[in-house]
Image (spheres, grey):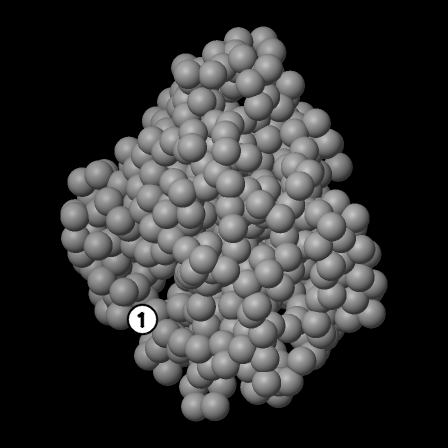
Amino acid sequence: MKSRVKIEDISKPSKKLTHLDIDELMPLPPPYDKIEEQPGWKALSEDAIENLETSLDDTIAIGIPKPKTHEEEKELVERFLRGLEKLLQKENNWTFLQPLLLSLEHCAKCQTCTQACPIYEASGKQDIYRPTYRSEVWRRIVHKYLKPGGKFFGRLSHGDIDLNWTTVARLMELSYRCTLCRRCAQTCPIGIDNGLITHELRKVFSQEMGIAPKELHEKGSVLQLEVGSSTGMNAEVVKDNIEFIDEDMQDLTGIEVHTPWDKEGADVLLIHNAGEILAWPENPGAFAIILEKAGISWTLSSDIAAYDGINYGLWYDDFQLGKVAIKHAEAAKKLGVNRIVVGECGHAHKALTVIADRVLTGDFNIPRVSAMTLLEEIVFSGKIKFDPSKNDFPVTLHDPCNMVRLMGIVEPQRRILRYLCPQFREMEPHGVNNYCCGGGSGFAIMSGHNFQDWRLAVSGRMKLKQIIEAFEDHPEPETKKYLCAPCSNCKGQLRDLFRYYGVQEKSGIIYGGLVELIVNAMVDVKQPFINFDEMQ
C-alpha cells in the first residue's frame, strides 16, 4: 500500500521518496492482465546506488554523480538557484517568460491535470508523478528563495520547502519522469502548463549546471553537430545507406528510384529522422517512391546535420535547439529550395516548424511544412493510382504529441487513412486528446540502468492499453493488424514496447509509418510492400 508523499517531503533525505510495485500499476487488458506474466523491471545495481543519486524512485534517467563534499553540494544548489533566477528574467529567457510567469502565479491547485497525465494514472496514481508535484516544488522554491521577504511570506502564502542538494537532485530526476506531452496544459481550465515548467527545469539543469542525459546531449545534439547525425553517421555513410535502400526499393516494387542529393533549386528539401535510415529503411524508401511517382522536384542534403531532422535540444536546451535549427535552414538556403518538408518525426516537426520561428528570421525563414500535408496533396492529386483493397486489414493511428496536440496537424493523415484503409478505426481518445507513446521528450532513446523498464512498464503503459483496445474486435493473433505511427521517435518506443510485452506474438499487431501504407496501396506496386511476417 503506497503512502502519501507531500510536497515538502522532497527535501527530506531518505532512501527512496517513492517505491513502485508492479501490482499497483494500472491494470492492462487481456492477454496482458496477468501480473505474474508482466516483465517488471530489474533492480538498480549496487554500484549505481553507491555512486549515483537514486533517492527519488526505483529508476535512474540521468545518472547524477553524488557530490563528494558538502562544499560541492552547496555550489550545485547555488548554481541551480541562479538558473531559476535567470528563467524569470526577460534578457535570459525571452522565449518562454510570459507563459512561465502565468504558470508560476495562477495555478488554482484544482488537480484537473492529474487525471490527464498518463504517467500518473499508469503508475497507480503515485503522488510524485502528478503534473503539479514538480511544479509546486518549483513554485515554493521561487517564492521562498527568490522573492523579497520570501522566507516569511512565501512560506505563509505558498507553503514551506527547504532548498538543499536532496531537493535539487530529486527534482532533476523528476524532470525526466514527464514526457512533455502537454495533456496537462490542454486540460487545465486556465492554461497552466506543467509541461513547460518541466522543460524549463531541464533547461536550468543543462544550461546552468551542465547536467543532462548523455543520450540527449553527448550522444545526441553534440554528436549531430560534430558528425552530422545523432546516429553517428557522416554524410558518406548516409549516402551509401540511401543507395542500398534505393536498390532494395527497386527490387521490391519494380519502380526505379534514385534519391537526389544536393539538388539546387529543388522544390522540396526533405529532412528525415536519420534513425529511419538505419532502423526502418522502408520508410525513406517509400518516401522516395511516392515523390518520384508524383513528379515532385525534391532533394536530400549532405550538409552536416541537414540529413538528420532530429533536434534533441527541443527537450532540454535552447542553445542546442537553436544551433541545429540554423544548420537545417543554412542547408535549405544554400540549395535555394522553395520549402523544407519534415519527414515522419514528431519532435522534428515542432522543433523546426514552430519553435524555430523564434530563431529563423530574415533569409533563414524558409517555408517549412509537414510531410502529412504534402502526402495528402499527393494522394488526392490523381497523379498516383491506388487500390484500397490492398490495405484491407485492421488499421489504427497513433497521434504523435508534437505533431498533433502541439501543432494541430490532425486531419491530413486521417483523410489518407480513411481513403486507403477500409478497416481504419480510431483509438480512444484520439487526435489532440491522444496519449503519448511513452517515449516522448527523449525517453525512447534513454535506456541506461533500468530506465527502459520504467518507460515500458509505466510511461508506455497507457499507450499499450489504447492499442490493444483499438483492436478488441480482432484480439486473435491470426488476424494481422497495423498500427500507423508517423513518427520515428514513437516507433522506437513502440518497437521496445512490443518486444517487452510480446505484442506481435500475442495480438498479431505490427507498427509502421504512413508512407508504407500509401505505397502498399499503389496499383503500380504488384507485390505487398508491407510484409507482416518480416516486420518485427
Q: Amino acid at mark 1?
A: Leu
Residue 119 visible somewhere in the drawing? no
Give coordinates of residue 291: x percent, y percent. Answer: 58, 63
**Residue shown at 56% from the left, 50% from the top:** 515
Residue at the (25%, 58%) spot, across then down: 103
396 versus 193 height, above or below: above
Q: Nearer the viewer, residue 488 or 208?
A: 488
How many numbered discs? 1
Given residues 18 and 114, the one toward you in this image is 114
Q: Residue at x 79, y 66 (%)?
A: 239
> What x and y, as percent, mark residue 369?
44, 68
Q: Could you tell me which secondary element the residue under label 1 belongs to?
A: helix
Q: Quadrant of the N terminus?
A: top left
Q: Nearer the viewer, residue 176 or 535?
A: 535
Point out residue 77 in the picture as x, y percentages from the top left corner. 50, 60
Crowding at mark 1 (Cα within 10 Å: few <14, some 14-19, many 20+): some
Q: Would residue 374 be visible to someone looking at this image?
A: yes
Indicate whether 421 appears above or below 220.
Answer: above
Image coords of residue 37 (percent x, y)? 60, 11
Q: Specify whether 15 is left or right of 138.
A: right
Give the quarter of the figure containing the C terminus. top right
Corner quadrant of residue 227 = bottom right
Residue identified by numbered label 1: 97
The quadrant holding residue 243 is: bottom right
- Does residue 176 sit above or below 362 in this rendering? above
Identify the residue shown where x is 71% and y is 66%. 259
List the single residue furthest toward the bottom: 362
